């Protein structure tokens, strides 16, 4: 680290106006931290079904170990998948370049009861193959394993370890690069509920993320998330919750110069949330939440040059409110409607900013034509503001994006053994500055063959 600092000084947000200081960083800001798995008794934020990605079916981060515990008892499934994606602008650049990606993969999922506990394993292995673009073809894998445990009749939790690796394929990147990211995490959750309806819980997540190219080494991170919560509810009145989330992230390969010498850069984000959830019969479920955010970059100030003088420049944090809400409505057994709205703060995953303020809205409608055929249509809009930004020499900082997406899908399951999925989507990014704008239309075909029990 010291040797690197002697040869190059990595710019930070307060240096955005001072090119003499900001001369080393050449790419976008570090991949980030995602919220840890929520304990079973906590009120989760609205599901993100309406805010769909570009069709990538194995997200690098954000995996929730509770998702593999939906089916009790002894279960196992083995799936073979082949995803085919045609993208009119696979590089995500103002001048489009079409590409085709094949993703063959296998997935193994196992649940094994041991007394009152349950061991689980969820593993993926595959490869992204971009036709006529061998530099962008990379292996991918994902692993999550652990134990779902129970203590008495009122307490339960999950302890798990996970690892994921794949090339970055996300829409907020300035453009696609052949960089592979690896995420390792350890997660533990605990939740208890009393006969009176009072619940309490806590979750802990330790996560690290590394990149395999030297130019993106400043994007490596280590993060810790701690979330205590308390809730109260009954079937008659719904469920109220109160939670606090403490996010601590450090970027070990990024540093800034302060009055006390070089310092590793990081950020702390606190979120306090009050939530309410209720089911109205079997057709309507409502989740709402209000949040308070406080973001503190570290170090809080760094040295900059103004009028040929070295001065202390505050990094700049954020204090403000947020919200989340979702409505899931099924007017009939065949139709399902999901609406979501969210305003939140995140550590910036791929863009030159320390953190982001995002407002997003989305909707999905699914119609079951017959038991084996489902049709969906939906869309999302999001405005993302990049805070405490930095940028490379000769470029301008990325201030904000407006990202819009619409899609239609068709899923055909003629037999339990296999299924076919088709999706056509269009996404557009309008950015400030305009150099980061792009439009893209995608067509995806998914073929899945599955064996197993449960």
Image: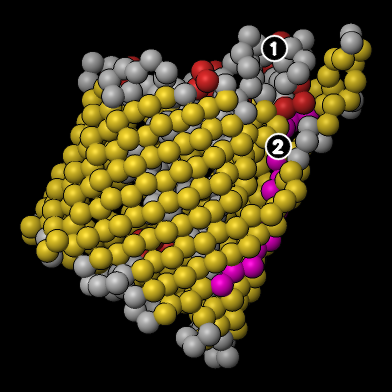
**Left or right of 198, for residue 364:** left
The magenta stretch is: 263-276
Magenta-drawn stretch, dominant element (helix, strand or loop): strand
Q: Which mark is residue 450?
A: none
State yes or no: residue 274 in magenta.
yes
140, 344: nearer the viewer: 344
**Left or right of 221, for residue 310:** right
Residue 144: % across, % down: 40, 52
Residue 227: % across, % down: 63, 61
Say which residue label 2 marks: 266
Residue 252: % across, % down: 66, 31
Would you identify the image quadrant in which residue 273 lies?
Answer: bottom right
Would you identify the image quadrant in which residue 219 lies?
Answer: top right
Element carrying mark 2: strand
Q: Quadrant of the N terminus?
A: top right
Would you identify the image quadrant in which residue 90 lies?
Answer: top left
State yes or no: residue 186 in magenta.
no
Say which residue label 1 marks: 23
In this picture, is 58 found above or below 225?
A: above
First in sequence: mark 2 vs mark 1? 1
401, 421: nearer the viewer: 401
Q: What coloring was used for the rendering?
A: secondary structure
Within 10 angstroms of label 2, few (less than 14), some, or many (20 or more) residues? Answer: many
Q: Is residue 5 visible?
A: no
Residue sitting at 31 percent across and 17 percent down?
97
In this picture, is 143 found above or below 369?
A: above
Within 10 angstroms of label 1, few (less than 14), some, or many (20 or more) residues? Answer: some
Residue extending farthest left? 414
Residue 327: % across, % down: 43, 65
In this picture, is 64 found above or below 147?
A: above
């Amino acid at each position: 680290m010291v040797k690197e600092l002697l040869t190059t000084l990595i710019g930070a947000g307060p240096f955005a106006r001072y090119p003499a200081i900001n001369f080393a960083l050449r790419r976008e800001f570090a991949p980030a931290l995602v919220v840890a798995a929520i304990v079973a008794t906590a009120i989760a934020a609205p599901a993100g079904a309406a805010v769909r990605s570009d069709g990538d079916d194995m997200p690098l981060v954000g995996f929730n170990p509770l998702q593999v515990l939906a089916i009790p008892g002894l279960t196992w499934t083995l799936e073979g998948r082949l995803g085919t994606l045609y993208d009119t602008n696979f590089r995500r650049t103002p001048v489009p370049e079409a590409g085709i990606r094949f993703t063959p993969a296998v997935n193994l999922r196992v649940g094994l009861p041991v007394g009152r506990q349950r061991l689980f394993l969820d593993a993926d292995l595959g490869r992204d193959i971009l036709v006529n673009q061998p530099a962008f073809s990379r292996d991918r894998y994902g692993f999550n394993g652990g134990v779902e445990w129970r203590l008495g009749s009122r307490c339960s939790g999950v302890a798990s370890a996970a690892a994921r690796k794949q090339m970055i394929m996300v829409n907020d990147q300035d453009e696609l690069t052949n960089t592979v990211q690896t995420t390792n995490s350890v997660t533990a959750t605990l939740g208890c509920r009393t006969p009176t309806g009072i619940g309490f819980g806590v979750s802990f997540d330790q996560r690290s993320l590394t990149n395999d190219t030297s130019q993106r080494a400043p994007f490596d991170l280590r993060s810790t998330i701690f979330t205590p919560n308390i809730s109260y509810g009954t079937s008659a009145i719904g469920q109220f919750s109160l939670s606090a989330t403490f996010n601590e992230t450090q970027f070990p390969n990024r540093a800034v110069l302060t009055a006390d010498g070089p310092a590793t850069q990081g950020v702390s984000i606190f979120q306090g949330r009050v939530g309410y959830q209720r089911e109205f019969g079997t057709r309507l479920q409502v989740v709402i939440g209000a949040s308070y955010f406080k973001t503190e970059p570290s170090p809080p100030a760094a040295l900059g040059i103004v009028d040929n003088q070295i001065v202390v420049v505050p990094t700049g944090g954020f204090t403000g409110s947020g919200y989340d809400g979702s409505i899931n409505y099924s007017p009939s057994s065949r139709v399902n409607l999901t609406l979501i709205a969210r305003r939140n703060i995140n550590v910036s995953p791929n863009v030159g900013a320390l953190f982001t303020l995002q407002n997003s809205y989305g909707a999905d409608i699914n119609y079951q034509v017959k038991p084996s055929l489902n049709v969906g249509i939906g869309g999302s809009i999001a405005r993302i503001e990049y805070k405490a930004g930095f940028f490379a020499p000769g470029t301008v900082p990325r201030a904000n994006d407006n990202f819009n997406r619409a899609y239609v899908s068709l899923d055909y399951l003629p037999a339990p053994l296999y299924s076919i999925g088709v999706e056509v989507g269009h996404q557009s990014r309008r950015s400030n500055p305009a150099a980061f704008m792009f439009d893209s239309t995608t067509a995806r075909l998914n073929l899945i063959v599955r064996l197993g029990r449960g």
